[in-house]
């Protein structure tokens, strides 16, 4: 017998056992009634259809998605907060036996607290997030029509407000443009009026300057003005000179008289000093007064002389004619007398000689 004989015998026995067991199972299945099998298959198909219908239901999908989202979101947040809270709590608990453990209990307690707090916070927050997310998803799905209507009403109201705002902006823009146009027109009109007024006034000023210059030239060129100015200047010079001389003499005399009482105390110096001061003041006052009086008198005389030049010339000519006539008459009379006197003398001489 070879070494593979025991293995073959074992395989044969196992095969026989399996064949016998399969025959037993077939016998049991054959014993089950045909109706029970049909009912079980129908129930399984019904459960399958219901499960598929539930999975495809939008309400179930929305609630499932919101529940999963809330669970994941809040579990992450809760895990983070739980880890931090457990870390702090474990570290605080570890501070109690820190003296006995040489401080190693603090990090150990913090690690243990973080390990316990993270899953605890994740679980609690995940459950709360799932419940909140599912409730929110259920409410949104149930009230989706109302929410959609509210959103539509909000959009309509917003669009209406936007339209009104645009209309108001357009109206304001048109009003602003109209006002700007009116202001521009008004500014242009005022500028034109100011320019016209300035031009007109410039012309008037130019005309006035030309007229003034012309009148000044006429006045300067006028013989009467020239004679008046020359007479006034001559009168002012003559009057100022005469007045200054008279004022000097009168002021010096008055000053000497004023300084005379104090001559005893000043050894006679007050007399010439007061005379000098009085002479200067009198010269100034006399020259001023005499110049003014002489200028007025000379100007008046020159003006009247020029004004009544014809009358004065006619009067002088008439007087000169009268003088000439008188002189001619006088000459004729003298000649007559001379000639008469000469004839008589001759006769007398003749008689004498005889």
Image (spheres, rainbow, N blue to C red):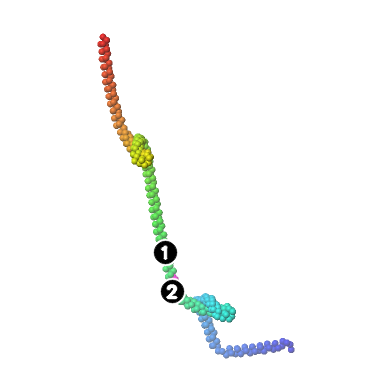
Q: Secondary structure at mark 1?
A: helix
- In the image, 294 versus 167, the foreground residue is 294
Residue count near mark 1 (Cα–Cα under 10 Å), binned few <14, some 14–19, many ≥20: few
Asked whether the beta carbons under mark 1 and mark 2 sit within 8 Å of each other, the answer is no
Residue that carries the numbered disc 1 in the rendered image: 165
In front of the other: label 1 or label 2?
1
Residue count near mark 2 (Cα–Cα under 10 Å), binned few <14, some 14–19, many ≥20: few
Quarter of the figure with the C terminus: top left
Q: Is residue 253 above or below residue 179?
A: above
Tell me what residue is drawn at x 51 percent, y 78 percent. Answer: 125
Tell me what residue is drawn at x 73 percent, y 87 percent. Answer: 3
Tell me what residue is drawn at x 39 percent, y 48 percent. Answer: 195
Looking at marks 1 and 2 on the same chain, the residue that comes earlier in the sequence is marked by 2
Q: In the picture, residue 147 is in which quadrant?
A: bottom left
Q: Was residue 15 drawn as part of the magenta stretch in this picture?
A: no
Q: Is residue 274 above or below residue 332?
A: below
Q: CA distance from mark 1 to mark 2?
A: 28 Å
Q: Determine the main secondary structure of the stretch shown in magenta.
A: helix
Residue that carries the numbered disc 2 in the rendered image: 146
State left or right for residue 93 relative to residue 181. right
- In the image, 348 versus 85, the foreground residue is 348
Q: Which residues are magenta?
A: 145-152
Q: In the picture, residue 103 is in which quadrant?
A: bottom right
Q: Is residue 232 above or below residue 26?
A: above
Does residue 197 appear anywhere in the picture? Answer: yes
Does residue 55 appear anywhere in the picture? Answer: no
Tell me where residue 317 appears, x and y as whole percent. 30, 28
């Amino acid at each position: 017998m070879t070494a593979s004989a025991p293995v073959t015998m074992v395989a044969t026995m196992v095969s026989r056992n399996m064949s016998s067991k399969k025959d037993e199972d077939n016998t049991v299945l054959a014993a089950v009634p045909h109706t029970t099998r049909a009912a079980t298959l129908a129930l399984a198909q019904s459960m399958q259809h219901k499960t598929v219908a539930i999975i495809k239901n939008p309400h179930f999908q929305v609630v499932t998605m919101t529940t999963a989202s809330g669970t994941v979101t809040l579990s992450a947040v809760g895990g983070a907060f739980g880890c931090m809270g457990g870390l702090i709590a474990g570290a605080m608990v570890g501070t109690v036996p820190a003296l006995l453990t040489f401080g190693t209990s603090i990090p150990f307690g913090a690690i243990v607290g973080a390990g316990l707090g993270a899953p605890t916070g994740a679980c609690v927050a995940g459950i709360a997030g799932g419940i909140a997310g599912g409730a929110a998803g259920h409410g949104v799905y149930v009230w989706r029509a109302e929410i959609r209507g509210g959103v539509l009403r909000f959009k309509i109201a917003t669009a209406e407000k936007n339209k009104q705002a645009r209309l108001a902006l357009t109206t304001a823009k048109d009003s602003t443009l109209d006002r700007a146009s009116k202001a521009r027109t008004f500014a242009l009109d005022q500028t034109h009026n100011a320019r016209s007024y300035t031009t007109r006034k410039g012309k008037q000023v130019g005309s006035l300057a030309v007229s003034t210059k012309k009148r000044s030239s006429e006045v300067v060129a006028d013989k009467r003005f020239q004679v008046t100015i020359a007479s006034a200047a001559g009168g002012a010079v003559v009057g100022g000179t005469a007045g200054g001389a008279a004022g000097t003499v009168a002021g010096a005399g008055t000053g000497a008289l004023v300084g005379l009482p104090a001559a005893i105390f000043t050894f006679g110096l007050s007399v010439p000093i007061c005379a000098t001061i009085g002479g200067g003041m009198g010269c100034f006052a006399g020259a001023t007064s005499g110049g003014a009086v002489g200028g007025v008198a000379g100007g008046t005389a020159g003006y009247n002389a020029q004004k009544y030049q014809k009358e004065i010339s006619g009067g002088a000519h008439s007087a000169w004619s009268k003088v000439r006539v008188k002189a001619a008459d006088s000459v004729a009379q003298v000649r007559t007398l001379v000639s008469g006197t000469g004839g008589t003398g001759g006769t007398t001489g003749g008689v004498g000689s005889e």
